[in-house]
Image (cartoon, rainbow, N blue to C red):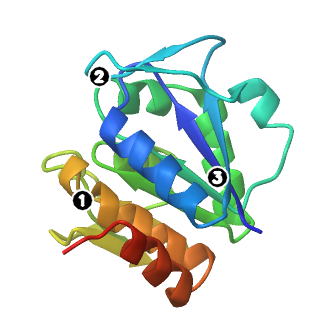
């Protein structure tokens, strides 16, 4: 079974965070949520999220994928956290998956993970990043790096993560249970 880390920072986009966590768990994937600091995370719209662990504790384990929810200032907090940047560098060097949605692809860029890659993000967040080929697609996968546009693409993004980590059949089963049109 795949194991995924979802770091949660104050000001994260709750729709993205909860959609990612929920759909991956529906697929039987082990998801660990980790707050950058101890305690409750206050998301961008005031929703209170309770992480499973602190990031310091979570970093004592290994993961198949790290997924960064967007939202502001949540993505900026992730970008400014040296532990997150180091984790992303280690994941990429080990050939493991890194993923980010909305404003959070800027964190992947800060870690150098997007160099020479195709990616997408919330409009404007990757415009000034050199060596990235920008796409307006809802979800972009370039090797072991996955990016997505924003809250409206969160379900498509999470389902793509499910497919990458499990199988097309599992994605279809999860999606069918959601009764998506």
Q: Position of residue 106 (x, y in %)?
A: 36, 45
**For mark 2, what is the residue?**
44
Tell me if 178 is positioned left or right of 30 in this view.
left
Nearest the viewer among 28 and 7 is 28
**For mark 3, what is the residue?**
89
**For mark 1, what is the residue?**
153
Q: Quadrant of the C terminus?
A: bottom left
Label 2 residue SS: loop
Going from N to C along the chain, the mark reached first, 1 or 3, is: 3
Q: Quadrant of the N terminus?
A: bottom right
Q: Residue at x 75, y 66 (%)?
A: 94
Q: Residue at x 33, y 73 (%)?
A: 140
Q: Position of residue 126 (x, y in %)?
A: 24, 51
Q: CA distance from mark 1 to mark 2?
A: 17 Å
Q: Position of residue 36 (x, y in %)?
A: 60, 22
Q: Are marks 1 and 3 in contact (CB under 8 Å)?
A: no
Q: CA distance from mark 3 to mark 2?
A: 27 Å
Tell me if 19 is positioned left or right of 122 in this view.
right
Q: CA distance from mark 1 to mark 3?
A: 25 Å
The answer to whether any part of residue 116 appears in the image is: no
Label 3 residue SS: helix
């Amino acid at each position: 079974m795949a194991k995924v880390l979802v770091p949660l920072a104050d000001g994260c986009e709750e729709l993205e965070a909860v959609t990612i966590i929920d759909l991956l768990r529906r697929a039987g994937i082990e998801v660990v949520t980790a707050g950058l600091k101890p305690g409750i995370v206050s998301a961008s719209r005031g929703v209170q999220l309770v992480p499973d662990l602190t990031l310091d504790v979570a970093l004592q384990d290994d993961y198949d994928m790290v997924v960064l929810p967007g939202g502001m200032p949540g993505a900026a907090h992730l970008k400014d956290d040296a532990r997150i940047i180091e984790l992303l560098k280690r994941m990429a060097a080990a050939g493991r998956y890194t993923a980010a949605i909305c404003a959070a692809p800027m964190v992947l860029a800060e870690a150098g993970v997007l160099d020479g890659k195709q990616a997408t993000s919330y409009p404007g967040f990757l415009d000034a990043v050199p060596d990235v080929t920008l796409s307006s697609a809802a979800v972009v996968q370039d090797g072991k790096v996955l990016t997505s546009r924003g809250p409206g693409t969160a379900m498509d993004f999470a389902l793509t993560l499910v497919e990458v980590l499990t199988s097309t059949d599992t994605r279809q089963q999860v999606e069918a249970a959601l009764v998506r049109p």
